[in-house]
Image (tube, rainbow, N blue to C red):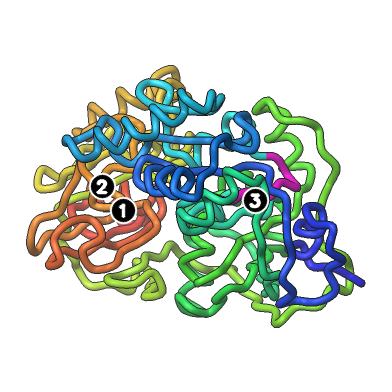
């Protein structure tokens, strides 16, 4: 059988012979992940089912990233539950305080996920690790509790949609634009319980951090996973981040796909996702004047060092519009330090930005950037549902760090070419 990447990755973790899509297979897991919102739910389920010990203390990862630092008593209690459980179980990878970063940026950076792994997490954006050539997917906290106890789970083998990007990228186009173009084309349910398998000449040369951005937003098209082959770019990244040297992993020639979507990006300019759904994608140049009140640069989608460099390239020597709050949240302590060493923090501060800690914060309407009634924001995060970042009467536009930074300077939804 010629296998898609999804089939091939799952076959590495099951003793069942995968022969077709839709098949239910029992799989061993490589990593089980939870955070300060979903972790306590999983812990209660773990204890409620009578489990005593996690299957492997080195392969459970708890990251206290959504409310870092904790904003109120409730969030502090959530972290306390996770901290106590981690201590009782002797969990190796527990992250809080100064060691904590946004989970889906932190794990690849620390070499905690490898190509070929099967990762399950109590967070929908666990699919990020598909950018490394891992099969990674989000699950409910009860399923995560079972995986913590047993080290295994069951999965339905997803059908795959092959996505081919062709053409030549505009200098101002980024991976965020590529994934938004796809979601705009197929819709937020266009890949429901499917695996999106990314390929083509454009993808083959795409930096690893860009691949993580695209895999991160596969769930916004309804996908079970967003997958990239493990190639020389992946191997180089893993070697630089403490990982093992792994073999290349890709789909078989002649593998069968539900369909193939081809996107030619030649001549394409930056885009944004307009309220209130990620699939409402429009070219920035086609929008009327839309004043904004806030910009957020960060999150598990675009809070990595390449994103910070992009934002700084726009903000250097410029000022944020005085009517705009521009919030910069490097995703991990390592990214924060790199920004400091490279002088990017000075760029942000001189431009008039608010620089904050490594937190999810405003992405989920948690803290550090809540929108008031009638306010608009441009964000580099992944969702713009009604009320996602605060008031139900607010609006969120999603774009790349280049678009977000340009918007901060212009005081309206704008692209780099507007400067």
**Residue 181 percent coordinates (x, y):** 50, 70
**Residue 153 percent coordinates (x, y):** 65, 56
Q: Nearer the viewer, residue 133 or 376?
A: 133
**Residue 53 percent coordinates (x, y):** 57, 34
Question: The N terminus is located in which quarter?
Answer: bottom right
Residue 419 in sight here: no
| Residue denoted by label 1 | 379
**Horizontally, is 407 left or right of 232 in the view?**
left
Asked whether the residues under the numbered discs 2 and 3 touch, taking CB atoms below 8 Å apart as contact, a structural biologist would say no
- Write the residue at 66% across / 45% down: 151
Dot 1 crowding, Cα within 10 Å, few <14, some 14–19, many 20+: many
**Horizontally, is 299 left or right of 7 in the view?**
left
Above or below — where is 28 with respect to 80?
A: below
- Write the residue at 56% across / 24% down: 92
Image quadrant in which you'd find residue 265: bottom right
In the drawing, what numbered circle is on residue 362? 2
Asked whether the residues under the numbered discs 1 and 2 touch, taking CB atoms below 8 Å apart as contact, a structural biologist would say yes
Mark 2: which secondary structure?
Answer: helix
Indicate which label's residue lies in the foreground, 2 or 3.
2
Which of disc 1 and disc 3 is earlier in sequence?
3
Above or below — where is 67 with respect to 335?
A: below
Question: How many angstroms separate mark 2 from mark 3 (CA)?
Answer: 28 Å
Q: Hey, which residue is sitting farthest bottom in the picture?
A: 259
Confirm whether the magenta stretch covers residue 3.
Answer: no
Q: Which residues are magenta?
A: 114-120
Dot 3 crowding, Cα within 10 Å, few <14, some 14–19, many 20+: some
Question: How many angstroms separate mark 3 from mark 1 (CA)?
Answer: 22 Å
Indicate which label's residue lies in the foreground, 1 or 2.
2
**Horizontally, is 346 left or right of 119 in the view?**
left
Q: Nearer the viewer, residue 299 or 158?
A: 158
Q: Hey, which residue is sitting farthest top in the picture?
A: 341
Which of disc 3 and disc 2 is earlier in sequence?
3
């Amino acid at each position: 059988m010629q296998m898609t990447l999804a089939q091939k990755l799952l076959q590495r973790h099951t003793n069942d012979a995968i022969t077709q899509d839709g098949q239910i297979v029992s799989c061993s897991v490589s990593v089980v992940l939870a955070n300060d919102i979903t972790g306590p739910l999983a812990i209660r389920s773990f204890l409620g089912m009578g489990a005593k010990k996690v299957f492997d203390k080195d392969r459970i990862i708890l990251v206290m990233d959504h409310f870092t630092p904790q904003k109120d008593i409730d969030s502090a209690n959530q972290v306390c539950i996770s901290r106590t459980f981690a201590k009782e179980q002797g969990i190796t990878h527990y992250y809080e305080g100064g060691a904590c970063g946004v989970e889906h940026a932190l794990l690849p950076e620390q070499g905690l996920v490898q190509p070929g792994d099967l990762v399950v997490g109590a967070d929908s954006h666990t699919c990020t690790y598909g950018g490394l050539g891992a099969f990674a997917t989000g699950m409910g906290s009860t399923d995560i509790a079972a995986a913590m106890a047993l080290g295994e789970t069951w999965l339905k083998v997803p059908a795959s949609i092959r996505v081919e990007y062709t053409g030549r990228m505009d200098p101002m186009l980024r991976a965020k634009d590529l994934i938004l173009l796809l979601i705009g084309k197929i819709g937020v349910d266009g890949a429901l319980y499917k695996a999106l398998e990314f390929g083509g000449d454009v993808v083959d040369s795409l930096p690893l951090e860009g691949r993580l951005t695209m895999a991160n937003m596969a769930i916004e098209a309804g996908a079970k996973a967003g997958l990239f082959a493990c190639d020389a770019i992946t191997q180089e990244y893993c070697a630089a981040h403490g990982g093992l040297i792994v073999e290349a992993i890709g789909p078989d020639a002649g593998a069968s796909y539900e369909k193939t979507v081809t996107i030619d990006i030649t001549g394409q300019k930056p885009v944004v996702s307009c309220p209130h759904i990620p699939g409402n994608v429009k070219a920035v140049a086609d929008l009327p004047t839309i004043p904004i009140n806030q910009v957020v640069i960060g999150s598990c989608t675009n809070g990595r060092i390449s994103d910070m460099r992009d934002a700084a390239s726009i903000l250097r020597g410029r000022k944020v519009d005085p009517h705009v709050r521009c919030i910069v949240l490097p995703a991990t302590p390592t990214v924060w330090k790199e920004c400091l060493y490279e002088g990017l923090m000075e760029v942000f501060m001189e431009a008039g930005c608010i620089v904050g800690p490594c937190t999810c914060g405003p992405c989920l309407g948690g803290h550090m950037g809540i929108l008031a009634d009638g306010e608009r924001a441009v964000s580099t995060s992944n969702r713009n549902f009604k009320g996602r970042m605060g008031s139900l009467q607010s609006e969120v536009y999603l774009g790349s760090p280049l678009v977000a930074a340009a918007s901060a300077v212009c005081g309206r939804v704008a692209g780099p070419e507007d400067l």
